[in-house]
Amino acid sequence: MIENELFKALADPTRRAIFEKLASGAMNASALRDGMTISQPAMSQHLAVLRSARLVREERRGRFVNYEVDPEGLELIATWLTRYRAYWPARIDALKILLKDMEQ
Amino acid sequence: MSDTEPEKPAEDLVFEYELDAPPEKVWRAISIPGFRDKWLPKEDLADADPVSTAPGEEIRYAMRDGEPPFLESVVTFQVRPGADGGSVLRVVHGLTDARLVPRKVRAANNNGPWMMLAA
C-alpha cells in the first residue's frame, strides 16, 4: 500500500524536513544538506525512502540529479477528497432526518 | 433544495445546504453532542469538543480519518438564515495534516519550516 509507505516515510523527522524543503522547489542533494547536520550517505538513504514512497522523484540532468516533490504522491489527497466528497452529503441527509425529528 | 459545491479550493471540500429548519435549531443539531451524535458519528471526530465555536454561527471540529495514513483534517460548519425561515449550512472540510502542510503553506505564506532550515 502506497499509503502505509508514505506514513512510514514521513514519520521520520529528518525525512519530513527534507520533504518540506523540497516542497519549496527542486534541488540537488548537496543543496538539500545545507543547514542540516546529516552525512551524504544518510541523505541518500533518506531520499531513497522518500522516492520509494513516491513522495519525491529524481530528475537527471547530465551528471546532476535534482530532487523534487512527486506530484503523483498527491494521489493520496485525491483519495481523501473522493472519500469525503461522498461522506458529507450522506451525513447531511442524516442531519435532515434529525431536524425533522427534533422539537422546535 | 439545492445542494451545491459553490467553490473548491485545491484541498478544501466546500458544500452548502439549504435546510428547512431555522438557524437556532440547526445550531443545536450541530453543537449539542446528544443531537450531533445522531447524524455525525462520534467515532468520525478526533475530539468530541470543538476546535472553536462562534455561538450560533460557526463551529469547528477535528476529524478522525478512518483509513491510513489517517490524515488530519478540520471541518467547519457555518449556519446563516436562509429563505422562508430556513437556514443555509456551509460545510468546509480541509486537510490540516502536518505531512501535507508544505503544499498549502507554500501558497499561503513564506514561513514554512524549510525557510528556517535554509537560513
Image (spheres, rainbow, N blue to C red):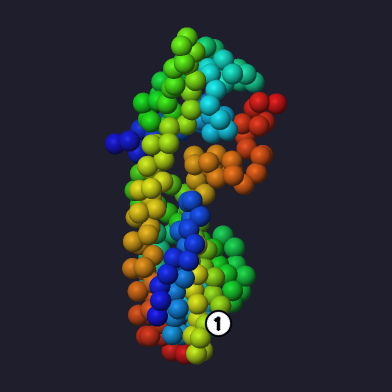
Residue A37: image quadrant is: top right
Residue at the disc numbered 1? B81
Residue A1 appears in the rendering: yes
Residue visible at 47% across and 31% down in the picture: A69
Give percent across and percent down for residue A55: 42, 32
Q: Is residue A5 above or below residue A104?
A: above
Task: Determine crowd level at label 1: few under 14, some 14-19, many 20+ residues with C-alpha closer than 10 A.
Answer: some
Location of residue A101 in the rendering, given as x and y in whole percent from the top left corner: 37, 85
Quarter holding residue A45: top left
Q: Position of residue A39 (x, y in %)?
A: 54, 12
Is residue A93 shown left or right of residue A21?
left
The quarter of the rendered structure image containing the N terminus of chain A is top left
Which is nearer the eye, A78 or A36? A78
Residue B66 position (above or below residue A34) = below
Q: Residue at x 39, y 53 (%)?
A: A81
> A81 or B74, which lies in front?
A81
Circle 1 marks a residue in which chain?
Answer: B
Considering every residue shown, the one lying at the far right of the view is: B119
- Residue B48 in view (yes/no): no
Seen from the viewer's position, the closer of residues A39 and B45 is A39
User: Residue lying furthest top in this view?
Assistant: A63
Q: Measuring 70% from the left and 26% from the top, which residue is drawn there?
A: B119
The amino acid type of the residue labelled 1 equals: Pro
Q: Residue at x 59, y 63 (%)?
A: B52
